[in-house]
Image (spheres, coloured by chain):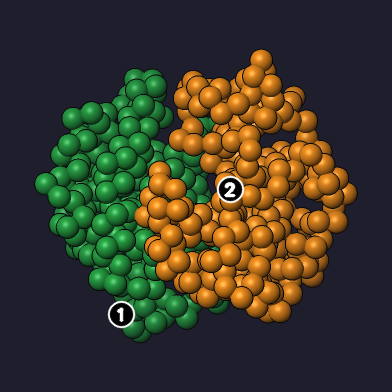
Chain colours: A green, B orange
Amino acid sequence: MTYHLHYWPTIQGRGEFVRLALEEAGAAYVDVARGGKDEGGGERALMADIGDHDHPSFAPPYLVDGKLVIGQTANILLHLGARHGLAPKGEAGRLWVNQLQLTITDLVAEAHDVHHPVGMGLYYEDQKAEAARRAEEFRTQRMKKYLGWYETVLEKAQKGGWLTGADLTYADLSLFQVVEGLRYAFPHAMKRLEPKLKRVVAVRDAVAERPNIAAYLSSERRIPFSTEGIFRAYPELDPA
Amino acid sequence: MTYHLHYWPTIQGRGEFVRLALEEAGAAYVDVARGGKDEGGGERALMADIGDHDHPSFAPPYLVDGKLVIGQTANILLHLGARHGLAPKGEAGRLWVNQLQLTITDLVAEAHDVHHPVGMGLYYEDQKAEAARRAEEFRTQRMKKYLGWYETVLEKAQKGGWLTGADLTYADLSLFQVVEGLRYAFPHAMKRLEPKLKRVVAVRDAVAERPNIAAYLSSERRIPFSTEGIFRAYPELDPA
């Protein structure tokens, strides 16, 4: 069965967490909106399709798996994790990985709000002063608190180096993506934080070396970071 | 088995979504931080306990269920829903209710950010100008988009009046809480929106009439809304 992923075609965004899981699993999938217009590609087709289901999604990404239409990034990963061995089989482990992922959801929302603190529908240029205020707290407190929490989780995990210990889960893939995004958007802040995040950085490195992930990252399927996505490099928000 | 809920003792906040599920289920639980200091009550004990687990939580609420320690509101509800018949048993239904809940998570985060657009660690009074900008978009666009989406979901659901059709789920309880919170924080905006939200309001009314919920709402266990919580009534953010 080929999955159909529906997400904005020109950014990594929240869809990237799903793409990484699909790539690691070696799953067959179509990134629908990135296809030609005759195959349902483009943003207009995405917006026409999203509501056209019994279970419509509030926003992309959503994944079509046969008759299932699943929205919300962490929910899609909950499903893929169970299908592809990217999460523990037991209830306790499954809930824990979901919790690790939902905390990444929170971090990602805050990373987005740095450049859109007062209006999602406004341009960054229309809220630069507010963004500068929000960025300062994000750089100096929130990034440290979130990443420090994952460092603590890794410290408490048993040997193996992954968030849950011995086995890679989709939360490790997502942690990789967060580190990459924050390095792109806040290189100076990350340079200051990383000496105290050795375990988090080790997860980032280990994910990058997974054969399927390495192949994906060097392919054209990996869209570059940009100032259209969630993690945005605005030098004024990350002073040296 | 008695559940132990750990959450800020003086606000409804995110913990309220968990309390509503526990109350509807008639489950035995201790709201730990609201207890006496000799029983682990108070915010200081909460902050001392939160990291003291193999699976620490990033923030309250978290629920202790025997050996399980579960954080993130939607994750706690995923667990309680399965245990207490507050979610469908099948995979498709379970994922759909999780998706409905995660979209409420997003709405709640935005409702919080209205009064804290540039600094979670700052007082509202230190970001009133930014809050006024953010509130305008929230009132005129975001509330409408979110609540309108739930109205559409209810319209697509089969007969029964609940979000999934025939049976109450924890997402219905959460939708009740969102309507109550928004009515408290944005009474004028809600008055304008509600005529187009008949199904959403009907869910709110039907939840309020559930015997266990009605008993809870009239008890001292229900903490009143206040300007310390997520939904805050600041008249300047909700002009007539």
- Which of A8 and B224 lies nearest the eye of the viewer? B224
Q: Is residue B84 visible?
A: no
Q: Position of residue A199 (x, y in %)?
A: 27, 29
Q: Residue at x 11, y 46 (%)?
A: A240
Q: Position of residue B173 (x, y in %)?
A: 71, 53
How many residues crowd around disc 1 within 10 Å: few (fewer than 14), some, or many (20 or more)?
few
The amino acid pointed to by label 1 is: Gly
Picture mark count: 2
* Residue B229, disc: 2
Q: Quadrant of residue A171?
A: top left
Is B135 left or right of A44, judged from the image as shown?
Answer: right
The amino acid pointed to by label 2 is: Gly
- Which of B171 and B202 lies nearest the eye of the viewer? B202
Q: Residue at x 73, y 30 (%)?
A: B29
Q: Residue at x 56, y 22 (%)?
A: B45
Circles 1 and 2 on the same subunit: no
- Mark 1 vs mark 2, CA separation in Å: 47 Å
Query: Mark 1 near mark 2, Cβ–Cβ under 8 Å?
Result: no
Q: Position of residue B210 (x, y in %)?
A: 85, 53
Q: Which residue is mark 1?
A: A36
Q: Residue at x 39, y 82 (%)?
A: A44
Q: Kindly report which numbered mark, 1 or 2, lies closer to the viewer in this rendering.
A: 2
- Which of A131 and B14 lies nearest the eye of the viewer? A131
In the image, residue B29 sits, relative to residue A11, either above or below, namely: above
Q: Chain of mark 1?
A: A
Q: Position of residue A88 (x, y in %)?
A: 48, 34
In the image, residue B203 sits, relative to residue A206, either above or below, namely: below
| Residue at the far right in the pictured view | B211
Q: Is residue A38 visible?
A: yes
| Residue at the far left in the pictured view | A240
Is B40 left or right of A230, judged from the image as shown?
Answer: right
Q: Quadrant of residue A92?
A: top right
